[in-house]
């Protein structure tokens, strides 16, 4: 039996989750909205054999005061499908993952876009299913109120069934294209969905041939109770944010157990926590880079980011006092809110300290040399805390170069990461089976 290997995807929208990234010396300040830069990034990542290039998405400008918003490098970025379609032409094997919302889009749109991307890229598409946590998004779609958390997940579960059903509209061999007889496709191999559910009504069929991968790879990012169950029933990759290895082990074991209970193979779910990678020649140098990066985050920006993550305005709190225990429940993301409150409690952080952590990058981070970071990643893999990682970069381009030119060779020398792709499709990279058609043998 072969030794397990890490799977690595690159989180590239925004190009760095750290608020100070665009200000770091040598960084490209316009990287989120510069096609030539993004093209060079994905080609470096493909040369390093990353599984996928992951484009998250937002359907509204971040909900924060203008004094903070004016400091954010995430205000503008390309629409994911447009960008990934363009990048597919300048790459050959790296996966192309895009976020698409089940709350503010329709199943037919989503099915059509991902089927198109999968065909254009010859089988490299992945759909990151999100329910949209930002309540402000509702106002961009003619709605005064954001759907409640549990209702969003209920709709998402039905949405998944509809989209995958639409992908299976045609049998794989439906298209005869016989020029002599004039028969383009076999009508016996066309299925009309005629779905009518609690939240959705979709006739079908989809007017695109079945995707190259059967279905694009399904990615899911929720860690709440409804999110975990949705992942267990539908996801093939989980993008998550545990704060440490113990939390990661709990999440890993819980998700794998749920997958089995759902009648699925646990090896067909890859759990890839998000982590910031800061690399130096010494551990001390790497820590100094992180401190320098954090120092570039203005308090106006950091307190606004904290308010957004908590779902309530905390700008009036004493910056040097503790976070109050009575932070109200909200209709925004429950996972980010809970993790920040827990972080403040565990590390006894002041509001200012928590804001700086949240406003810069408050999640899991590996800070050290290629060797020390490889040691940590190997521990996570061996101890069933992760199947790999969703890599976030502290700044670009140097952060990408540090990972691809320094960390990847160290991982390869240990047999922990591939030296070449296993195939041409994203499913092949991840070791995932091609799903059977629901309607045709």
Image (spheres, grey):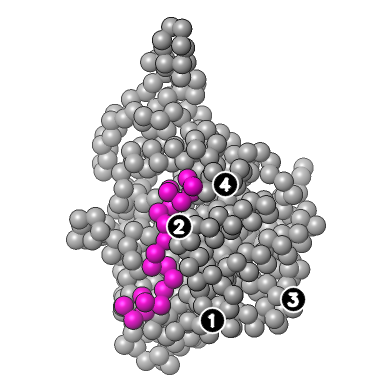
Q: Residue at x 36, y 51 (%)?
A: 101
- Whole-number angstrom distance, CA of label 1 to CA of label 3: 19 Å
Kindly state the secondary structure of the residue where label 1 is placed. helix
* Mark earlier in primary sequence (1, 4): 4
The residue stretch that appears in magenta? 66-86
Residue 317: x, y in percent? 34, 88
Q: Residue at x 58, y 78 (%)?
A: 25
Does residue 141 appear anywhere in the picture?
A: yes
Residue 379: x, y in percent? 71, 63
Q: Total of numbered circles in the picture?
A: 4
Viewer-proximal residue among 258 and 366: 366
* Mark earlier in primary sequence (4, 2): 2
Q: Residue at x 49, y 24 (%)?
A: 172
Q: Mark 4 = which residue?
A: 90
Q: Residue at x 40, y 90 (%)?
A: 319
- Whole-number angstrom distance, CA of label 3 to CA of label 4: 33 Å
- Whole-number angstrom distance, CA of label 1 to CA of label 4: 34 Å
Label 1 neighbour load within 10 Å: few <14, some 14-19, many 20+: many
Residue 220: x, y in percent? 47, 52
Residue 310: x, y in percent? 37, 74
Does residue 126 appear anywhere in the picture?
A: no
Say if the magenta span includes residue 79: yes
Q: Mark 2 = which residue?
A: 56
Which residue reaches farthest top? 181
Q: Which mark is residue 281?
A: 3
- Whole-number angstrom distance, CA of label 3 to CA of label 2: 31 Å
Kindly state the secondary structure of the residue where label 2 is placed. loop
* Mark earlier in primary sequence (1, 3): 3
Viewer-proximal residue among 120 and 328: 120
* Mark earlier in primary sequence (2, 1): 2
């Amino acid at each position: 039996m072969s030794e397990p290997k890490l799977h690595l995807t690159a989180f590239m929208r925004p190009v760095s989750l750290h608020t100070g990234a665009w200000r770091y010396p040598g960084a490209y300040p316009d990287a989120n909205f510069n096609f030539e830069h993004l093209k060079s990034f994905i080609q470096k990542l493909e040369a390093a054999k990353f599984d996928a290039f992951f484009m998250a998405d937002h359907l509204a400008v971040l909900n924060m005061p203008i004094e903070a918003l004016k400091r954010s490098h995430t205000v503008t970025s390309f629409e994911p499908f447009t960008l990934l379609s363009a990048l597919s032409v300048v790459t050959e094997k790296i996966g192309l993952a895009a976020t698409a919302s089940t709350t503010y889009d329709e199943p037919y749109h989503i099915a059509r876009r991902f089927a198109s991307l999968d065909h254009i890229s010859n089988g490299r598409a992945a759909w990151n299913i999100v329910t949209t946590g930002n309540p402000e998004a509702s106002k961009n779609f003619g709605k005064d109120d954001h759907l409640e958390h549990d209702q969003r997940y209920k709709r998402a579960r039905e949405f998944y069934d509809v989209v995958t059903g639409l992908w299976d509209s045609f049998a794989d061999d439906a298209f005869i294209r016989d020029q002599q007889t004039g028969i383009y496709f076999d009508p016996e191999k066309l299925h009309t969905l005629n779905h009518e559910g609690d939240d959705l009504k979709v006739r079908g069929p989809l007017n695109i041939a079945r995707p190259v991968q059967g279905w694009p790879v399904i990615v899911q990012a929720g860690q709440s109770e409804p999110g975990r169950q949705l992942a267990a029933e539908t996801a093939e990759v989980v993008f998550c944010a545990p704060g440490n290895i113990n939390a990661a082990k709990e999440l890993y074991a819980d998700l794998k157990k749920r997958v089995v209970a759902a009648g699925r193979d646990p090896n067909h779910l890859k759990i890839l926590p998000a982590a910031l990678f800061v690399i130096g020649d010494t551990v001390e140098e790497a820590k100094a880079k992180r401190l320098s990066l954090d120092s570039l985050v203005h308090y106006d920006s950091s307190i606004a980011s904290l308010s957004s993550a908590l779902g309530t305005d905390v700008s009036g709190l004493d910056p040097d006092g503790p976070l109050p225990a009575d932070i109200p429940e909200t209709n925004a993301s429950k996972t980010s809110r809970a993790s920040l409150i827990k972080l403040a409690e565990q590390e006894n952080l002041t509001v200012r300290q928590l804001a700086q952590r949240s406003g810069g990058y408050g999640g899991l981070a590996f800070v050290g040399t290629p060797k020390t970071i490889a040691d940590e990643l190997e521990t996570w893999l061996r101890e069933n805390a992760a199947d790999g990682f969703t890599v976030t970069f502290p700044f670009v381009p140097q952060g990408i170069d540090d990972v691809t030119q320094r960390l990847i060779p160290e991982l390869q020398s240990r047999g922990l990461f591939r030296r070449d792709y296993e195939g041409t499709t994203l499913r092949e990279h991840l070791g995932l089976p091609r799903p059977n058609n629901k309607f045709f043998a």
